[in-house]
Image (spheres, coloured by chain):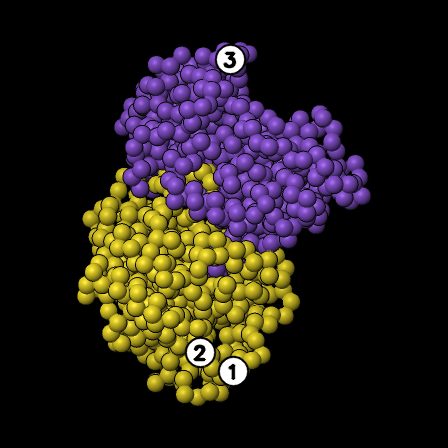
Chain colours: A purple, B yellow
Amino acid sequence: MNRTGPVHCRSEQEDPTAMTAAPQLARTAPAAVEAVLDRLRPLLGDRLTTSAAVCEQHGRDESYHDPMPPDAVAFAESTEEVAAIVRACADHTVPVIPFGTGTSLEGHVAALRGGICLDLSHMTAILEVRPEDMDCTVQAGVTRKQLNEHLRDTGLFFPIDPGADASLGGMAATRASGTNAVRYGTMREAVLALTVVTADGRVLKTGRRARKSAAGYDLTRLFVGSEGTLGVITEVTLRLHGIPECVLSAVCPFPGLKAAVDTVIETIQTGVPIARIEFLDANQMRGINAYSGTDYAIAPTLFLEFHGTEAFAREQVGMVEAIAAEHGATGFQWAETLEDRNRLWQARHNAYYAGLALKPGAKGFSSDVCVPISRLADCLADTAEDCAASSVVTAIVGHVGDGNFHVLFIVDPDAPEEVAAARALNDRIVARALAMEGTCTGEHGVGYGKMAFLEAEHGPEGMAVMRALKVALDPDDIMNPGKIVRV
Amino acid sequence: MNRTGPVHCRSEQEDPTAMTAAPQLARTAPAAVEAVLDRLRPLLGDRLTTSAAVCEQHGRDESYHDPMPPDAVAFAESTEEVAAIVRACADHTVPVIPFGTGTSLEGHVAALRGGICLDLSHMTAILEVRPEDMDCTVQAGVTRKQLNEHLRDTGLFFPIDPGADASLGGMAATRASGTNAVRYGTMREAVLALTVVTADGRVLKTGRRARKSAAGYDLTRLFVGSEGTLGVITEVTLRLHGIPECVLSAVCPFPGLKAAVDTVIETIQTGVPIARIEFLDANQMRGINAYSGTDYAIAPTLFLEFHGTEAFAREQVGMVEAIAAEHGATGFQWAETLEDRNRLWQARHNAYYAGLALKPGAKGFSSDVCVPISRLADCLADTAEDCAASSVVTAIVGHVGDGNFHVLFIVDPDAPEEVAAARALNDRIVARALAMEGTCTGEHGVGYGKMAFLEAEHGPEGMAVMRALKVALDPDDIMNPGKIVRV
């Protein structure tokens, strides 16, 4: 647990101003790609394309990392089609890069060696909702908003909310979480079972619908967070939750960062099952006011939400208000109606775009560390100081109930010194989190953007085991190659 | 999700009356074992033994499966010693069988190919408790009762309770759960990180203490439930929980099995965060009265527990009492004091021994299926009918909030027809659970006792992936060989 020495994550050969360059891996031989295309055309017709515009769009996510287009994009409509596509690629050793909504943030979908992008966004069938078991099975391309819309009349909802309207297959593949994770867990807890097409084109069911099982290795958790590097997730069975009888949301400014974070820490330690507790720094609040037309105080702020029966939700509110008052907070601003609540959380969800509004014309990229809650106050305070001393415009926002926060770096991509300063800041934030027994990514995942930090986090032993798993399940390295571990 | 055809789990060559015979695998060459012993003697001194009595005891768990002694037992005191032992065994291709308290139930510790039993029961150091993070790190030999005793003054507790006072390393290795899992989850959720000695004798930290991470493959969950077949767990970092302000426990008889189970199902569906909800059939209650000297009604019964603030615990009670009343239950019997509560749960925990009291001189073995909650009423009713029609004495007890239940078969081991009937009943219970999208083991694990059912549950694709993982991480098949998957 104590790998707390200095963290040297990057090689000396790298250009420090080229924050986001995709690694240069050998491109797949055109003849192999052609052979796959010839085989797939009869199956997919115009759902197989080599259009430059479509390929360009599919090699790019929402991050600032360099995109890399695939050689072709295949739009699959069923698990069987995915299996046929993977088998064709396996036969010719051509890479397969799964693609959901393209909202990932670490270069996950960049086709580093070319190959076939497997777009699952047509797989939008909600296969089964079982209200009596509080679970459902959906195709991988169903988005979280589509699912919640579909569930509206059942009294159930799917709580995991990473901000973007991501596909549930993609959320499983990246172990996504977001604002509700403090109460409802992450995709690690939400996924009951998966259907996965393995690297040899076989269809695997990773588990059954029982709430628990001790029947062998945990294949479900092996594929959750594997980012398409071990197989393609085509169907997801998810736990659902009852819509709470009572939902109470509030915004509360604090006299300082430490007061806000200490309120979070005490709330968690008191065992209040708070549904959301989000931190935003003063810069972030300034951006939100500018972007969303709100007039929140420009101060370190918590956005909070409480779920339960009315009596229990109000009891939780009383406990948290008391804790906040001890830390000098006085101005709880309640959102009483559904519309007010939606407006409040929409403002929170727009944090990224609001951050960009702090510096017109700039682009943003986001750090994503997570530390044990006892270290959160120190980690955030040191980070805020580091940010203030830097030339980079930053905004901080965090799912602080989990110890997870993001620093948004708002930089001019054409100013190399800004890019280099942001990159150095990001490296220091990761090193600080690792030194505090934290992780280099709480929820965004590895893609190719975070690979440089993995060995510092997991040590050579952890990387050796990850590499062994990758080689065992994808011996020809065709599944989203060049991500998580390089073999 | 729909592998619901007929389940043929056992080969035709097997003797149906030999319910528990250990598989006959080739024993390790004595010269190889001798070479390991020669190497380990200087390190371990009298903590290395080939005493027949000690070996006999270490090849046996609490189940009715045939034991199989190792060639020697090594008592390790540190991760470094475990690593040295594993390296010696790896160099000579000698099996390593980890041993905690020997309370497993599926032949997990039987040394099917001989080799070295690695006893971790001396590793009882509580390395660190971090109340502010609500977590702790312990050596693998610490038992759950030892940990809770140690935590007594911190206001925290470790909730997972499989009945036996098992070691926490063993509980992690078998993905244990028990009565509190409906509220607090299983070892899958409780383990934050592990220290594992891999098959090549390296020391792996599977994760950090952050509550969530998206940094690569989920190594922690890979080793949780791997039953010593991928590595030896030497340290466990666990989530802890605040001792609830208020704990309320009750026993309630029901007019019939269906009334009790429907009460459970509605309670779960209503979202009441009940801490324990345990079902016991009339036979089991008769055994408990005989064994524990209690005078509970001889009827299908629920044992319940509620945790929370006083107001919230009482609110939960009100909701469940209302549901139970709709199903004809009238006699909630409350345990008001800590002593009364302990007596109540001790009676529940003694269910296994109480079951044996139903037939003096008999031995017991236990089924362990888990189904989606919507199928629980049907699964239990069909199983109860099947048991009633059989010649075998049975008692049913279950962690029904999770859909998990056990049928205890109480048989004369010297009566082959009883053994055969119990074995056939067990096969039918597993087949029924699998047909209902359930699992062959909710919490006892696979060992060698449940291997015959794994392919029916996971399909050839699942078994192929499990085998690939085993070969990747233990290429020489020295880690608890012959369990979970045979390679």
Q: Chain of mark 1?
A: B
Image quadrant of residue B140? bottom left
Q: Chain of mark 2?
A: B
Residue A323 x/y as whole percent: 30, 32
Left or right: B58 with respect to A108?
Answer: left
Front one among A265 and B56: B56
Q: Which mark is residue A412?
A: 3
Mark 3 residue crowding within 10 angstroms, few (<14) / some (14–19) / many (20+): some
Image quadrant of residue B339? bottom left
Residue B249 x/y as whole percent: 33, 59
- Whether residues under marks 2 and 1 lie with C-beta atoms below 8 angstroms apart, the answer is yes
Which amino acid type is marked by label 3? Asp
Tell me if residue A171 can be seen: no
Q: CA distance from mark 2 to mark 1?
A: 9 Å
Q: CA distance from mark 2 to mark 3?
A: 71 Å
Mark 2 residue crowding within 10 angstroms, few (<14) / some (14–19) / many (20+): some
Q: Which residue was labeled with disc 2? A: B21
Q: Is residue B188 above or below residue B134?
A: below
Residue plotted at (34% across, 70% down): B31
Which amino acid type is marked by label 1? Asp
Q: Which residue was labeled with disc 1? A: B15
Element marked by disc 2: loop
- Whether residues under marks 1 and 3 lie with C-beta atoms below 8 angstroms apart, the answer is no
Q: CA distance from mark 1 to mark 3?
A: 75 Å
Residue B282 x/y as whole percent: 43, 75
